[in-house]
Image (spheres, rainbow, N blue to C red):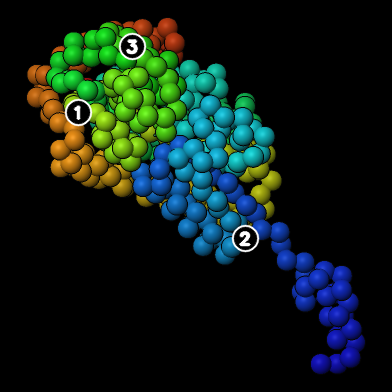
Amino acid sequence: MRKPLLGLVVFSFLLTGTPSARAEQQIVLKFSHVTTADTPKGRAAEFFKMRAEGLTKGRVKVEVYPNSQLFKDAEEFDALAKGQVQMLAPTLGKVSSLGFREFEIFDIPYLFPTKASLQRVQDGPIGKGLLKRLESKGFLGIAYWDNGFKIMSANRPLLAPADMRGLKVRIQNSKMVEMQMRALGAVPQVLALNEAFQALQSGTLDGTENPPSNMYTQKMYEVQKYAVDTNHGYLGYAVVTNKKFWDELPADVRTLLEQALRDATRYANAISQQDNDDALAVIERSGKTRVAHLSDTQRKAWRQALAPVQKEAEARVGPDLIKAINKEVAILGGG
Ligand code: LMR
């Protein structure tokens, strides 16, 4: 090596502490969520981590914090705004707490008869418009991740809607879910997901609702003797990031993260139904929870009992939005 070049290398080393240009600062992306790792959302977050770190060749490090390890529901939007985390995947109904009541449409009982109708709305102008609204809060809604339809559970047999009457039930932070439970004569109490088991085990609360994957991974089935496959409401997620963080990423890194997110979204929506079917099967095999499977006639009684909630919802999300959704659903022949 000719002397002058050697001098340049030595000078560069002294200047940057590395034999080449300063090593680019690794970007750390903290992803906080409230379910366990072994759920559709938890697995999709890990998939995103794997893809993001692979595609960026380590320029981005994703740290996933499941099961409210870092922040609970009530804290996570504030943490995202402050840059303490860079990605969340809150349940759609919880996004309403930011002042966007329209996100509660996903909690309206029996509004979406099938996942196809739900995804048609999410992928269309209504769904895109909802995510766009988050920008006014400094957030970017960058994907919808699926989980599934919810079942009801309690420590007394559940078959008809009247069986819910008087039950003290744990619910997530959603006004629409609260209205749903009150329509059934139950008494709703908002509680963090990872506190539900304790409340049900101690008998402070009698029952709850969630997709089977959450019922299983939060071990709620161990303290709920009965369940019923009402499939009355939907539970899915909005993947949200901090707009400033995302906009300030190097353009090539952002493009790679967008690819990683697309792949993780495809993965999430591909595994979710099987995850929930498997969770329900394990719950039934455990013998700890007896799951009632409704006939069409029996499920019709739940639809009728919960129909008033859709009417009440108009005051919260607007009649036009519900009408537009029903129109989309009808196109697919659902409902
Ligand atoms: C719940 O709080 O029951 C769910 O919204 C949790 C989740 O993120 O699936």
| x, y percent for residue 235 | 35, 30
Ranked by sequence position, the earlier of labels 2 and 3 is 2
* Ligand 1 within 8 Å, label 3 CB: no
Q: Between residue 333 and residue 303, name the one nearer to us.
A: 303
Q: Vertical placement of 186 versus 152: above or below?
A: above
| Amino acid at the residue labelled 3 | Val
| x, y percent for residue 118 | 33, 30
> Is residue 107 visible from the viewing direction of this image?
no
| x, y percent for residue 27 | 65, 54
Mark 3 falls on what kind of element? strand
Image quadrant where residue 20 sits: bottom right
Q: Residue at x 42, y 33 (%)?
A: 194
User: How crowded is the residue under tag 2: few (<14 C-alpha within 10 Å), some, or many (20+)?
Assistant: some
Which residue is label 3 attached to? Answer: 187
Which residue is label 1 attached to? Answer: 225
* Ligand 1 within 8 Å, label 2 CB: no
